[in-house]
Amino acid sequence: MAKPIELEINGKRYPVSYPADTPLLYVLRDELGLTGSKYGCGEGQCGACTVLIGGMPRRSCQIPVSAAAAKPITTIEGIEKDGRLNPVQQAFLDAGAFQCAYCTSGMIMSSVGLLQANPNPSQAEIVQSLQGNVCRCGTHPRIVDAVHRAAKMMQEHRR
Amino acid sequence: MSNVEGKFIIEPERYEFSAVPMHQFELARRDFFKILGAGMAVFAIAKDTPAMQETAPGPRAFHNEELPKDISAWLHIGEDGSVTGFTGKAEIGQNIRTALAQTIADELRVPFESVRMVTADTALTPFDAGTFGSRTTPTITPQLRRVAAAARDLLVGVAAKEWNVAPAGLVAADARVSDPASGRSLKYAELARGKTLAQNFPAEDPFTPATQWTIAGKAIPKVDGKAFVTGRHQYTSDLRPAGMLYGKVLRPPSFGATLTSCDDSAAKAMTGVFVVRDGDFVGVAAPSAHEAQRALDAIHAQWKEVPQISSKEIFSYLKQNAPAKSEDRFRKQKGSVEEALASAAHRLDATYTVAYIAHAPLEPRAAVAQWVDGKLTVWTGTQRPFAVRDELADVFHVTESSVRVIVPDTGSAYGGKHTSDAVLEAARLARAAGRPVKVVWTREEEFTWAYFRPAGVIEVKSGVASDGMLTAWDFHNYHSGTSGIDTPYAAANQRTEYHPVPLILRSGSYRGLAATANHFARETHMDALARVANIDPLDFRMKNLSDPRLRAVLATAAKSFGWPRKKTQEGQGFGVACGYEKGSYVATFAEVAVDETSGAVRIARMVEAFECGAIVNPDGLRNQVVGAMIQGLGGALFEAIEFENGRIKNPHFGSYRVPRFRDVPEIEAILMDRKDIPSAGAGETPIMAVAPAIGNAIFDATGVRLNNLPMVPNGLRSA
């Protein structure tokens, strides 16, 4: 029998019993109860399931759980710090950047990934990096605004 | 229904509203206070107001469905001062949870933070026909105001009795009743204490005019926004009651296919797997989604397929299969169109087509069903919880009171979640398994087995006099529907006719319904007529419009857009369109940039003025208006369902293109607040004028007139 898979998620280690080829998303949601990451298409085309793997935004519906075990995983449940919202979460809240909000977790995780790599993205860079995330309610302008706000908040925090 | 006998039937045309019987919902008083704790409950009896009904395509199109005439709304004031309002409407992203709480707080005179809403739970909330037709704001807002006003009067009455003074001299404000004469005051919480009082009130109380609103009318953020940015909010698809199994359903290979044989022995032999066969329904439930999928894959079924119309031939099919003459109720006529056409200075005839499109809500259909002692509880994202309850009761042969439907705040719908498919599937599987079952449709299932905004063909004949007045208007809609079919322009001779055609694909409601198709045809045609008559398109509209509200949105948006504008670049073009529907008014202006070499069309800017009476929450409204503008871009430019041999050819986000960040132009939404006009709904109308404004701008840029939606699925070159 293969060695059981262990995942590091939001700083905690979780043993996984689902088969090794199960996409990470189903392990997160169904086995571990981390339902903040959403199923939107299961095909890597909508971004609702986005998590960070080794700090990089990844579509968790496209990554077999075996391939996700090597690096630390961060989900929407893991970005608050000391009971305070992550600046990106706070910015989405401040900008009212959601309607049905089903895409919000994925939008936030994609944006957290973007801002880690590029702390001061241009409008075009934000649009480019969120192009793979679907918001069917049409909240795009506020989402872009929220990412700008988050970038500003994080810069002020660093100063 | 029983597990072993009878046929589990999923009706093919569930999109139609069955005539819902009127229900006298009577929550037992004891149960009510058991749930909410002691305090004061107030029930309002609705005014005898039949609800406006949206018009779905098909034979019921012009029918009305009435709201119940008895108890319409209620609220509870707890002994801790907390206020709970109840409505059968569902939160699907349109932000009614916030707007309705504002309404109650405003009328009851309590802080916004003390109010919470219980929505769309058939065991707790008043009967409601459904969350559609932009009806929440115009019907539920006044009902909640009535009940809140009644509660306020009741509290004042209790205080008056306590102090032995006349109620007229007392003041209700900030969750207190005060007596200015004596300086005494009591909190609502104190006045409600130990009352366990339930009282019916006639719905005649006058309520606060919009000019005096203090909490309604404010841009209050979404009440539970934090639950969404943290991922803590539990949508239906996130629920996992103890012992829950994951359900999957075997789908036919094509529409209309019937099961001829099915070998499920391998699936049945799998540990922990339940297989249900009931008529053509074949489903499995298993402890995990992958085990359910494995079981489903192990089932070998044979199907008998039947020939189906394809998207390539749909428009000629619709024309050929329309009845020679439609029923009188589908036709409106005045003057003589034929004579007016014959004598017109300018004539223009054209045909427009509109493709099937999908709602594609990001949360696909989902349901969790649980049977306990013969009683069924389901959680599902539906716009019609009471209709779902009735269907479940019907299908499973149990009483309505044995079924409870709860709607968690849902991952959007846009008119696409009226049916109970996933619920029936989950409930059937749960009944067989004796455990809770969750069914979440895959994206492909959602794109294939849900329902669509119907395709349509629209034919227009028209004539204009030499002075630029529209004299003849002949407008025929085949199949797509009646919403927004009437022209607001003052043509002395006109005929408007809807030609129903039997369904091809399963079709139903969609944000704006056929108003988008009818506005596309009408507003494109008006633009083309203006060019024929050599009049500026905005002037031509104004010349033929008398409705002051429609003129006002046009004038307002024109000013912000800067109409008329001079072109400053190659490939630049400007367009306008307008309309009204469901009590709200919209004018949209678009600027496009067409790359003449590649034929690529980019929307550079859109300006929309929108007016829906008194605005309840400008922040939520802005989200709805901008959202509708962006969603409208998709159907205007590239969204289309392609089908052949009963199969959807593009059932994925990779092949069915929805608007993404790069498609979004600079957008300006102007919200016109008319405090003198009762609030209308705003979820639908802002989408209607987007496509024709863009099409008219493309014509302005290129001289190419696009009469088919979507207009440029592959850029202008292949159009």
Image (cartoon, coloured by chain):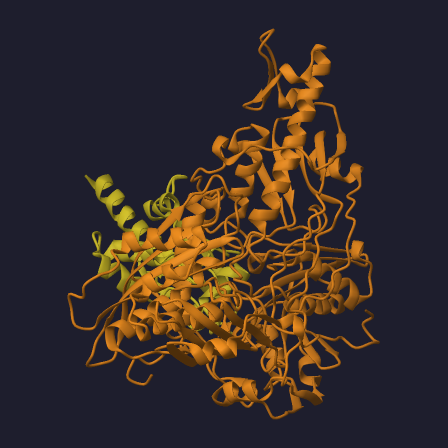
Chain colours: A yellow, B orange
Q: Horizontal placement of B614 versus B64: left or right?
A: left
Q: Horizontal placement of B4 versus A140: left or right?
A: right
Give the residue at x 55% y 85%: B318
Q: Quadrant of the C terminus of chain B?
A: bottom left
Give the residue at x 42% y 56%: B586
Q: Position of residue B624 (x, y in %)?
A: 44, 54
Front in this rendered view, residue B302 or B398:
B398
Q: Position of residue A146 (x, y in %)?
A: 32, 50
Quarter holding residue B269 = bottom right
Give the residue at x 32% y 45%: A87
Quarter holding residue B593 = bottom left
Question: Taking the image as drawn, is residue A67 in sight?
Answer: no
Front in this rendered view, residue B302 or A139:
A139
Front in this rendered view, residue B304 or B669:
B669
Q: Position of residue B282 (x, y in %)?
A: 69, 79
Q: Quadrant of the N terminus of chain B?
A: bottom right
Q: Position of residue B345 (x, y in %)?
A: 37, 76
Question: Taking the image as drawn, is residue B392 in sight?
Answer: yes
Front in this rendered view, residue B626 or B477:
B477
Give the residue at x 58% y 36%: B104
Q: Horizontal placement of A154 versus B489: left or right?
A: left
Number of numbered discs: 0
